Amino acid sequence: MKTLLMMAVVLVSSVLSFTAPLVLLRQRRPRQVIVLNARGAKGGSKRDDLSAIESRDMTREEMKRFNEQSAKDMDNGMAVMTAASLFVSLPILYLCWVAFHSD
């Protein structure tokens, strides 16, 4: 009897995990929308003055240094992701080895 009850509980819980949860509908008040500009002031209809921001193109040497640093960062990230994926796959590989080499 306990086994049957336990199987029923497991079956119901596994079936419920694949269904959408019930959502109770209720009316909500419309939210008040406040528009903020870049400085956090209310409003937003005025145009912001961006003249204080200075921009310029990078020189060829700066671009080369930036590209080299980006390439190093990408290589480091790829090495870390490869090591992490190998580490995570070790238990699966072990289980496959046990499955095929067990008597």
Image: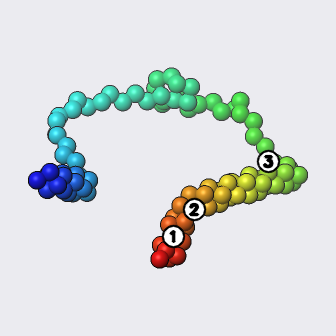
| Mark 1 residue crowding within 10 angstroms, few (<14) / some (14–19) / many (20+) | few
User: Along the polypeptide, which appears first: circle 3 or circle 1?
Assistant: 3
**Residue depicted at x 60% and y 57%:** 87
Q: Give the alpha-carbon distance from disc 2 to disc 1, as whole Å.
A: 12 Å
Q: How many marks?
A: 3
Q: Mark 3 or mark 2, which is nearer to you?
A: 2
Instruction: Give the mark, 2 or 1, whose residue is nearer the N terminus.
Output: 2
Q: Residue extending furthest top?
A: 41
Circle 2 is placed at which residue position?
90
Residue projecting furthest to the left: 1
Q: Is residue 48 above or below residue 75?
A: above
Question: Which residue does the numbered mark 3 point to in the structure image?
Answer: 57
Q: Secondary structure at mark 2?
A: helix
Which amino acid type is marked by label 2?
Leu
Q: Gap between marks 3 and 2, in whole Å?
A: 48 Å
Asked whether 101 or 82 is in front, the reply is 101
